[in-house]
Image (cartoon, helix red, strand yellow):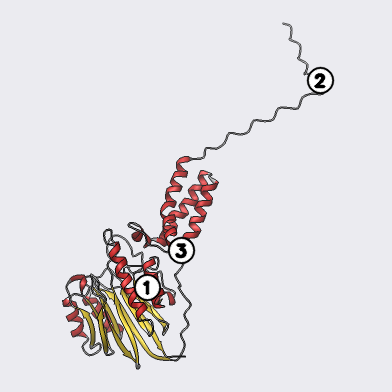
Amino acid sequence: MDRAPATAPVESPSGTSPAPAAPEPPPLRPRHPLTAWAAGLLLVVPGLLVGCRVLDEDGPTPVPQLLSLLPWSAVPAALGVLLAAVARRRALVLTAVVVLTATAWASLPHQPQLVTSYGLPLAQVRVLASNVEFGQGTAALTETIRRERPQLVFVSECDRACGRALSAAFASELPHRASVDADGSVGSVLLSAYPLRDEGVIPAAMGMPGATAVIAGVPVRLQLAHPLPPVPGQVDSWRRELGRIEAAAARDRSGPLLLAGDFNASQDHAAFRSVLEAGHLQDAARLADASRTPTWPMEGPLPPFVQIDHVLVSEDFTVRAIRFLDVAGSDHRAVLTDLDLRGGR
């Protein structure tokens, strides 16, 4: 069989051989649209919370409830960054990184002002704030008071039986009291080793008694805080009652002030930060570098994740130590704070 003659290469008009054809580009990888959607959804809540933090607003339900989880929202934000990178969407990756960075910034402990206390210490004061959950933690709180020996005790949700039990148990050590005597969560008691005067109550659904104690010759205003929680349907009431606490803090800021209790709000809530700013107050936990120590919930399927129990102090005090104590029968940790009351410059 005859072989077909080899085909000669075709020359270009100039007489040179043509350049070889460029190789075809490799096929593009798929961009995973479902992964991109998942990344975007993970960023919605962190972005919303950071936006409210920047705007200094608590917003409507469910924002106040979700703000209690603001530091934990860094977890979905970080997953959003990872999924955005897998999806190979540059704009989405950039957005996710911005949201994660802003979440980390918003989670830093709130420091409204740098406070420096002057003067020599006039007295050492130990303060205990505890929510005993409808009186169920009364027995455990009694043991805690005996062991820790505070001079001031702020007790929320202390019903009539709780109030009688504490007053009888500490008639000698804490003989002075201001209270709202009521059942269930409405009752509250403020016990003091120092004489009290000018007793009053902030109007609220739950008891918030206050008084002035004379400590080392200095009048110190004491106020128990226990506004309604920001559950759906009563966010406006929660905001209104925190506003009344803010007004009381602003009114009493001319002298030493101790404001303690279950605020049902964390440093991530604008309404709580307004209380600090109005009274020129600091959270004792922040001054002791413990402002993210959770105090609630101590019961139920979830571990404690938010600090809503606080001891707030004016610049007349320095914080020597703070501890968070479990109280059997209560869904809150108690806050035990050692303070120095200081004189003038």
Residue 51 % position (x, y): 44, 58
Crowd class of label 1 (few under 14; some 14 to 19; many from 20; radius 10 Å): many
Residue 124 placement (x, y as % from top left): 37, 88
Residue 125 makes an appearance in the image: yes
Secondary structure at numbered mark 3: helix
Residue drawn at x 57%, y 36% as measured from the top left: 28
Residue at left 34%, top 58%?
60
Disc 3 residue crowd, few under 14, some 14–19, many 20+, Cα 10 Å: many
Mark closer to the observer (1, 3): 1
Query: Label 3: which residue?
Result: 106
Tell me if label 3 and label 2 are in contact, CB under 8 Å.
Answer: no
Q: Which residue is mark 1?
A: 275
> Residue 293: x, y in percent?
38, 70
Residue 166 location, x and y as percent? 21, 81
Q: What amino acid type is highlighted by mark number 3? A: Ala
> Type of residue at label 2?
Pro
Among the two numbered marks 3 and 2 on one chain, the one whose residue lies closer to the N terminus: 2
Give the distance between the C-alpha atoms of the residues marked 2 and 1, in whole angstroms. 88 Å
Question: Which of label 2 and label 1 is nearer to you?
Answer: 1
Kindly report the distance in space between the C-alpha atoms of the residues bearing marks 1 and 3: 18 Å
**At x 46% / y 52%, what residue is drawn?**
79
